[in-house]
Amino acid sequence: MIQKPVLPKNWVAVGFSQDLEKGQINIVIIEELELVIWRDHKGQAHAWDNRCPHRGTRLSLGFVRGNQLACLYHGWQFGGDGQCVYTPSIPDSTPPKSLKAHTHRCVEFLGLIWVAPLDFEHKDIRGLESHVRDSMDFQPVRSMIIYCSAENIFNRLASIPFPPSRIMSRRLRSISNMRLIRETESVFLWEDDENRTLASYQFREIQPDFVEFNCESEGTADVLLFALQKIDSQKTALHLLLAPENWSSDPISLKLAYAQWSKKLRNQLEQVF
Amino acid sequence: MTKTTDPVAINDWQVIGRIDDFLKGQPKQTRLLGQSLVAERHKNGDIKVHEISELGETLRSCPVQEKFGHVWTTLGKPKRELFDIPEFQQIDRKYVGCGGVMVKASALRVVENFLDIGHFPYVHTDFLGSEPLTEVKDYKAEIRIDVDEVWADDISFHQDKAMLSATGGKAVEYMYRVVSPFNTVLYKTCPEKPEEWDIIGLFAQPLEENLCRVYAFMLVFDSQNTETDLIHFQQMIFFQDIIILENQLPVGVPLYDGAERSIKADKTQLQFRKWLKQKGLQFGTDQET
Ligand code: FES
Ligand SMILES: [Fe+2]
């Protein structure tokens, strides 16, 4: 008999807020548990098990009607708290309290959507907030699937330094012909024929599967945040956020440059030794 | 998957195809309850069915019968005869076999969907129902112990186009009959002959816990439409159901309490689940952990 999947007892980032518009419905998977993530028309995001309490139909097949989610199979409608408010086959009665979707905690923070089980005791996301320097302006870089376990990624992230923003904003899209030389445990030298830039790195675990990577380079400090979402033992979603020393005159190009670099990161993480 | 150990599913008759699917000299492989089978029609016209191993070696032979346009076999020793559908003897009915359709779902979910009225306005919009006429009025559903079947009747539902032969929306009467866990028929108002019922039936071949092939058929009074048109109508309706059937979690039907919530309109399904539980059927169900 297979154990049914359950949510881990911590906050898990499942994607960027900007990728879930009002009325939109997405599917995400956390440790093999399939969830429906949807945003109502007030703007509130919700995370539920992706199955209707009635006959198990994937709620992601349904429709957002105002601030309710309607199931495709029999048209049951659920309010934001998961309570069923309408059963069309008994149109004139108020549905009993027992008709309720399987809901989870869902909050937005740093431009990410976070999910935790209802019975998670550190339910206040500000617990997480106090660990992140809130003066920093974090922007989403990219979400990507990596074919590798979250543990494996976690163990190797610290050994894959990211280019400092001063190099990135100079070269924008192409860092491919830069050499990277390890000077000490945490100090690296980025160089090409014209430039040599020293950068020192610091790696910090904020909570399981959420890490901060700092880079100090010639007076500038950049921060990358990696939020890992375990999909299963072989597959992880990585949500990458960036707060550079400053967003410069061309923030879109800078973000794109890091998005390009993140593909290299993925290749390295997926490499089998 | 390997052959199920569920004695209830093993010791019962199961469909493995339409009669015309098995031609002389053309042995066909199929699956039943997690077991590979080979079926071949011999020169004398008889079909022989054998279980085969993963390597293709022939193992034991299985009993066969051809009935209701389909071929039936069993992996065990059925305690009772194959059910009867007496309407097959009414020669003025038109028999239409719709062929087999693979569905990535438990055969039990398919049967439950067949017994379900509440989904008509949402899944078969403008054919079998539409908003705002979504109410399922009270009806009767019961396990009939004498025949060991589940029955539902006194059902009436507003339908826009109940059958291909129907013109205009009207209230349509229904009766449901579950003859064995994976086989069921329904009776509905016959647009052409109001004193008779049209019959639609569904035989599900449980290949694996999460995979089945569904053979639908009709026994109707319809002098207007061609067989092809009737098949197309029925297939269109069924393809709408498949969207749901392949998206139900868990895949198996949960028979334990509290897994899924039901309301008054689900009476037939509740009787069906109770009946399955009494039988102790496991194949195609979801097990509590
Ligand atoms: S399964 Fe969702 S309303 Fe019936
Ligand atoms: Fe249907």
Image: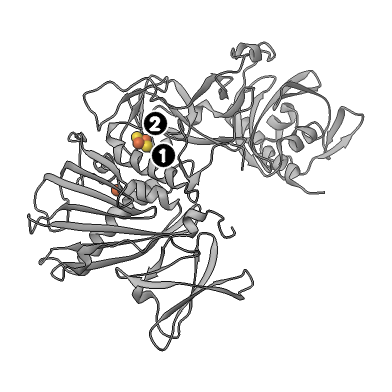
Q: Indicate the position of residue A101 as horizontal and vertical percent values.
A: 43, 27
Image side of residue A6 versus residue B197, left or right: right
Q: Tell me if mark 2 has few (under 14), some (14-19) or many (20+) residues whose alpha carbon lies within 10 angstroms of its own.
A: some
The nearer-to-camera label among 2 and 1 is: 2
Instruction: Please indicate whether residue B190 sits to the left or right of residue B208 in the image.
Output: left
Residue B247 in view (yes/no)? no
Q: Quadrant of residue B266?
A: top left
Q: CA distance from mark 2 to mark 1?
A: 12 Å
User: Can residue B253 be seen in the rendering of this structure?
Assistant: yes
Q: Are marks 2 and 1 on the same chain?
A: no
Instruction: State whether residue A129 is above or below residue B212.
Output: above
Chain ID for label 2?
Answer: B
- Answer yes or no: disc 2 within 8 Å of ligand 1: no
On what subunit does the disc labeled 1 rest? Answer: A
Give SS at disc 1. Answer: loop
Three-letter code for the amino acid on which mark 2 is drawn: Arg
Tag 2 residue: B261
**Image quarter for residue B265?**
top left
Q: Amino acid at mark 1?
A: Thr
Residue depicted at x 41% and y 85%: B24
Q: Position of residue A73 (x, y in %)?
A: 34, 39
Question: Is mark 2 in CB contact (under 8 Å) with mark 1?
Answer: no
Q: Is mark 1 within 8 Å of ligand 1?
A: yes
Neighbour tally class for label 1: few under 14, some 14-19, many 20 plus, Cα within 10 Å: many
The structure residue drawn at horizontal position 55% and vertical position 19%, both measured from the top left corner, is: A118
- Residue matched to label 1: A57
Mark 2, secondary structure of its residue: loop
Q: Position of residue B54 (x, y in %)?
A: 62, 68
